[in-house]
Amino acid sequence: MENDQTIYLIDGHAYIYRAYHAISPLSNSQGQPTHAVYGFLNILRRVIKEKSPKYLAIAFDAKGPTFRHTIYEDYKANRPPQPEDLPPQIPYIKMIVRGYNIPILEQEGMEADDLLASVATHFSDKGEKVVIISGDKDLLQLVDNNTIIWEPMKNQLIDRAKVNEQYLVEPGQILDLFSLMGDSSDNIPGVPGVGKKTAIKLIDQFSNIENLYENIEEMKKSKLKEKLVNNREQAFLSRKLIRLKTDADIPRDKDDYRIPPPDQDILADIYRELEFDAYLKEMASTSSLETDNFIIIHTVDDLEELVNLLRDQPVIVIDTETS
């Protein structure tokens, strides 16, 4: 599905935490913690190396409460406080993103998921191909004919068929499925006692929760029916919380997502401060390459001239870039 016109969107908030927990604590000689920065940078470099994106943006959560907290005060209330050594690393992560000249999506009152959803739906509706880079299951509701999800840490691509394989429903039914199941990690209630298997059966039978509750009296008397009836408001509240907004204030011109070459000076300064010596050496080795004698082949005549030149050489070395 991917091509050189594909728009790539990275769930920056999710990968900050994944990077933080995936790597043992690191710090530079000044005691500045660096492991979240290092892990995030590795993920970003992998995306750039493997996908060679021309269009890319990274979404972050803004500080403070979101619109979901106004709907439900206890939203994410069970989350542990942010680790003390993580906040000092976030500004460096954003500096690296800016050093790579990648657009940052961030909006007060919105979560990163809402920004990703707004960009993905906008461009998918225009027929553009979109790849969302995330491991957040709530983003599965965005999968369609033009949008897929890539999880680089598991090297997993998720399209419509994969969603159906994992959850036995269509991507358009994921929202209703999760609304019944709830989500303990975000403190979203759902319907108590309704797990994945039961929720799948209900969505398979009724398609969505509106139809489920419109026909609830047709269900035989049971503990399940009692739970559904008693927790109707919770089911619809959960759907409001899980539903991703698609009307965030995001750039709507595709060229706003085109990324120019990185600013090597900015990146070098950050690598030097954080003592990412391997990346500094890598930059030094690539920047020392002289291109004065490089020749670009534009025409068949140019190619024939090169072939004639090479025929008389005792050794020829060919390097291929096959991304």
Image (spheres, rainbow, N blue to C red):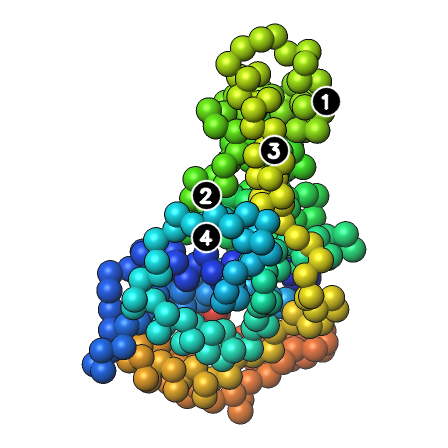
Judged by depth in the image, the label closer to the viewer, 2 or 4, is: 2
Residue 267 lies in what quarter of the image? Answer: bottom left
* Residue 224 x %, y %: 53, 17
Q: CA distance from mark 4 to mark 3?
A: 37 Å
Q: CA distance from mark 1 to mark 3?
A: 14 Å
Judged by depth in the image, the label closer to the viewer, 4 or 3, is: 3
N-terminal label among 2 and 4: 4
N-terminal label among 2 and 1: 2
Q: CA distance from mark 2 to mark 1?
A: 27 Å
Q: Amino acid at mark 3?
A: Glu
Q: Which residue is mark 4?
A: 152
Q: Amino acid at mark 2?
A: Asn
Q: Which of these two is toward me, 43 or 117?
A: 117
Judged by depth in the image, the label closer to the viewer, 1 or 3, is: 3
Q: Which residue is mark 1?
A: 214
Badges 4 and 3: C-beta atoms under 8 Å apart? Answer: no
What secondary structure is found at the residue carrying circle 1? helix
Residue 233's disc is 3
